[in-house]
Image (cartoon, rainbow, N blue to C red):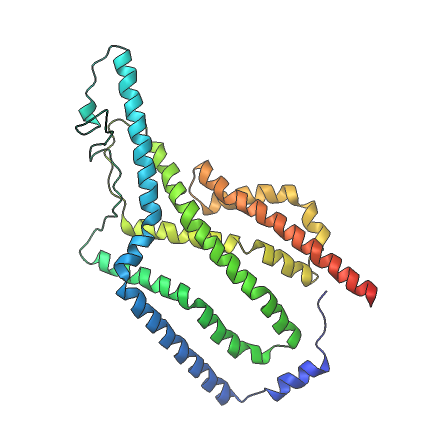
Amino acid sequence: MATLPNPDDEQEIEASRMTLGEHLEELRGRLFKSVVVLVLIFSVVYAWRFDVFSIIQGPHQKAMVMLNEARAEHFHELIQERQAAGKEVDPSTWFEDGYPEAKVLTPSFRNEDRLKHFSADQGFLLRLRVCFWISIFLAGPYLLLQMWGFIAAGLYRSEKSVVHRYLPTSLGLFVGGVLFGYFVMVPYALYFLGLDDLNLETLEVSAQIASSYLEFMKGLALAMGAVFQLPVIMLALSKLGLVEASVWSQYRRHMVVGALVIAAVLTPPDPITQMLMAGPIVILYEVGVFLTRLAASREASEQALS
């Protein structure tokens, strides 16, 4: 349950009270430091912009390799089936010279791992955007520290302890969710979406647009970062006395349905990608149930001892 502030907290806040001018001066100082750090990190990231952009393309390249292997195997089986049926078939329609020893698809049927730009300046602008996102991500802890330094003066000691306890875990889960989105969700989402065109014999594959890929990757990665906050949110609601720990267990089945609905809204329409998101949601929910039960039992033990 939430507790009332004690007199010591009131005295501490009163002692740290500042005038409006002092608040504005402190805010200006912290904003200046944040901007300086952000600019410095951006400068370093931009100096390595081509390497950074190559890393960003990693999930796309992984998906294209898997798609090309699946497409080559599909057309190889198609050729064998037609030859077994006594039909004439020209492997050069799909494969380059060297087939069947080397199953290399022709450019028309091969997914390119390079992203395409529509205009001369689009690549430059996209690299700027990517460097800015990465800089915000890397500078995030320092920016949050400056924000916390400005806000903390007006909080009670109990409120500060809650932030100290949960914020590091929340940040760790967010980073874990983003990395899960980058390494798992994005490449396999692209792969399973591409499988939908696998059986089209006359399909000419075009390069993926860089801007649409980056938006796709950013959306999925941030969505997974948000989803990974579930245990912290559950624990916070229980600590505040808004939801009893036992209630979470009662709604397990509802959560499974809710996870599927959330995955259907936040991910592409293929069922595999939706399951890749729904699965972690259910697991994280179970982690949250365990943590809320553990916290409730500890609180009950402390009350019994007192």
Q: Picture quarter containing residue 300? A: bottom right
Looking at the image, residue 238 sits to the left or right of residue 24; the answer is: right
Residue located at (63% from left, 56% from top): 234
Q: Is residue 261 visible?
A: no
Image spot of residue 54 (x, y percent): 29, 53
Q: Is residue 263 above or below residue 146?
A: above
Image spot of residue 13 (x, y percent): 63, 83
Image spot of residue 219 (x, y percent): 41, 52
Residue located at (70% from left, 83% from top): 8
Q: How many marks?
A: 0
Q: For this rendering, which residue is in front, 160 or 201?
A: 160
Q: For this rendering, which residue is in front, 44 or 267?
A: 44
Residue located at (50% from left, 85% from top): 23
Residue located at (25% from left, 31% from top): 203
Q: Quadrant of the N terminus?
A: bottom right
Q: Quadrant of the C terminus?
A: bottom right
Q: Residue furthest top?
A: 86
Q: Picture quarter containing residue 208? A: top left
Q: Is residue 254 above or below residue 224?
A: above
Q: Is residue 234 visible?
A: yes
Q: Is residue 40 above or below residue 123?
A: below
Image spot of residue 299 (x, y percent): 75, 62
